[in-house]
Image (cartoon, rainbow, N blue to C red):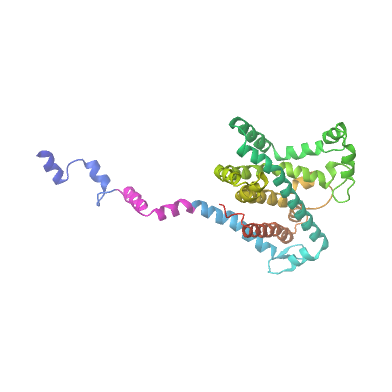
Amino acid sequence: MPGAFASEMGFGNPRRSSASGPGGHSPLRRVSSLLYRRSTLYLFLLLLPPLLWLGTVYLGSLFTLLMQSFYAIDEFTATVVPKLTLATYEQLFRHPANVDIILRTLAMAVAVTIACALVAFPIANYMARYATPRMRAFFYVGVMLPMWTSYLVKVYAWRLILAKQGIASWFAATLGLDGVLEAALATPVIGGPSLASSYLGMFIVFVYMWLPFMILPLHAALERVPQNLLQASADLGARPRQTFRSVVLPLALPGLAAGSVFTFSLTLGDYIIPSVVGAPGYFIGMMVFQQQGTAGNIPLAAAFSVVPIVLIAIYLALAKRAGAFDAL
């Protein structure tokens, strides 16, 4: 009775009564109950900080870049005139040297993407369908190990490998392929004095650098191909080539599209590899670096930066139209 009387009069457990508040629940408990009942609000509050960061840093930078490309530079004072104009884009596409730079970069990006797909598909297919767990782990380490090394160290190492008296020349001479190497270097467009000073050598370095970005998405896509579909195709009398064309390839298109976006975009924007390895000739990344650094022409550098964005958007639209994302 004394306990019940004390509880009715409000004297029992003062710590509990003070923490409960007037409504019987603490403010933290009420907020927790509100978020539990309204899961959409809870999800919005969780996503608000990263969305603000993405909108401020990434989208804000892209918008600033886009605005800078519509400015022009005064030829006399070498200062940026903050007035909307298409003079910079006119300079970009009317000057033959700038058009050559865009076409050269685009051709290299397409060639590197195709080569990475051709090399990565058999490796990813073997990893997904035939490799034992131990062999698959070995391939994982082999694919990702070069990514743990410094980017500049790999580029300069390849310059030494592809030099005139480097390992590549010695290896070709040892196998009796020095004639083939000399014929490749004598080709007008891709050749040069040595592999380190030719577009062929630049192409080799690009493929080496971006190959892991093609293998891993392809392996993830091929690993999700149901085995019963392959068995059903074989039971219906389809040959391995027909099974690959009708079953495997359509289901692997999302991984192929993801890997090609990586290789295509990375080749379009890279400026270090063309500066260290390859024949003399500017690429888009080199022009952006030079125009915003040495020349101080920020609008032209921004206009060059918009070109890869437009090319990647066009590529994604074509890939979506071809059904590359239907299996996602």
Q: Residue 248 in magenta?
A: no
- Image-based side of 300 in relation to 50, left or right: right
Q: Position of residue 214 (x, y in %)?
A: 66, 45
The residue lying furthest to the top in this view is 134
Q: Which residues are magenta?
A: 26-48
In the figure, residue 90 lies in which quadrant?
bottom right
Vertical side of 114 occupied by 122: above or below: above
Quarter of the picture containing the N terminus is top left
Please state which of residues 309 and 84 is positioned toward the viewer in this rendering: 309
Please indicate, yes or no, whether residue 14 appears anywhere in the rendered image: yes
Q: Nearest the camera: 239 or 58?
A: 239
- Left or right: 38 in relation to 233: left
Q: Residue at x 55, y 56 (%)?
A: 55
Residue 291, position in %: x, y? Answer: 76, 56
Above or below for 33 versus 89? above
Residue 301 at x, y = what percent? 73, 58
Name the residue located 66 percent from the left edge and 59 percent from the top edge. Answer: 318
46 magenta-colored: yes
Whole-percent x and y of residue 14?
Answer: 22, 42
Quarter of the view holding residue 142: top right
Can residue 277 be seen? no
Image position of 208 (left or right of 223):
right
**In the rendered picture of this protein, how many numbered marks are placed on residues?**
0
| On screen, residue 59 above or below 86 | above
